[in-house]
Amino acid sequence: MMLARAFILPAALVFLSIAVLTALYRRWWLAQAALCGTALLAVQLIRPNVGHSTMASNAHLRVLHMNVLQPNTAYDEAIQQALESHADLVSVQEVSPEWAQVLRQGLQRRYPYVHIEPRRNCYGIALFSRHPFQEVRTITVGGDPFVEALLNVNGGPVRLLAVHTTSPISYGRFRRRNDQLEQLGRYVARSDTATILVGDLNTVPWDQAFRRFCSRSGLRSMTPALHRTWPSVGPFALIPLDHVLATEGITVRTIRTPAIQGSDHRALIADLQLPHHAP
């Protein structure tokens, strides 16, 4: 049922299309039924909107997140996209040893601070930064590696977590993903440092597991439900699996979801406004 609910947004658009078409053919009862179906689905997508910042300040970060798809061999295109993003931080997921080598060679000159945990099971992860790491380490949650980094940005500490939770393609993996989100939520809540979390959480904003994670961790979603990232087919994607979240006081200035050549995910590029003095 959770997997079915993940596709509520495209299902609502299908019902809306049926309502419009049947109204054009004057099938009023069918049109009204389809419109009711649209409303019943769409109401589940409603969630608090995160305010956008218009403040002019040097205290900001641009974060790029890319799930490159491990078998993908469009290495040069992914590196070029990362360089052209002018991001301060680049999080890359599904990093195999081959991806790790080409990413380090292609990005280390622009991003000299690097932490890579390659894997062959599609859960390798890497973080590249223009800002020095005060601390950086791998944390293992439910058997998968996540990256935690502490940086100093404009005189204040900022913690960044790069995360890729388990894909819930079976009931056992569904429970494992939920357990990862519960553990991670408790872990994030232990610190009062300004925190940004970015990654493929393999869940959607209207999933109860996602909402419990936000409540437990104290993080707020920066990515609107309409910013769909998977599966990416040409200019389209169906559901929002990739997310940027942050603690209170951090706001989003702009967010984009460009395509990644050869990947089944779209990227996220988020410009985030930081508090002048991060706690």
Image (cartoon, rainbow, N blue to C red):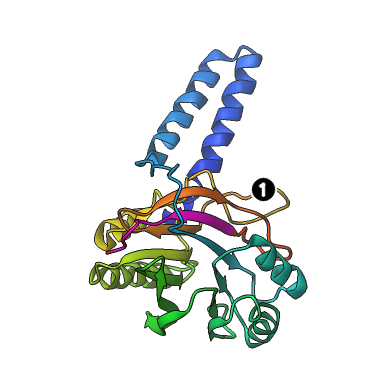
The number of numbered badges drawn on the structure is: 1
Above or below residue 211? Residue 225 is above
Which of the 4 quarters of the picture holds residue 232? Answer: bottom right
Residue 20 drawn at (x, y percent): 60, 22
Can you identify the residue that label 1 sits on?
Answer: 236
Q: Nearer the viewer, residue 223 or 278?
A: 278
Q: Nearer the viewer, residue 153 or 239?
A: 153
Residue 207 drawn at (x, y percent): 38, 53
Left or right: where does residue 108 sit relative to residue 273?
right
Which of the 4 quarters of the picture holds residue 161? Answer: bottom left
Instruction: Name the residue at 59% across, 66% down.
Output: 66
Instruction: Name the residue at 52% across, 36% down.
Output: 12
Tell me where the magenta segment starts and ends, as one range: 268-278
Q: Nearer the viewer, residue 106 or 243?
A: 106
Residue 38 visible in rendering? yes
- Picture quarter with the C terminus: bottom left
Above or below residue 132? Residue 16 is above
Query: Element type at marker 1?
Result: loop
Instruction: Name the residue at 50% across, 74% down.
Output: 131
Left or right: where does residue 182 sit relative to residue 240?
left
The amino acid on which the numbered mark 1 sits, given as a three-letter code, is Phe
Residue 5 drawn at (x, y percent): 44, 49
Residue 200 visible in rendering? no
Q: Would residue 274 be counted in the magenta stretch?
A: yes
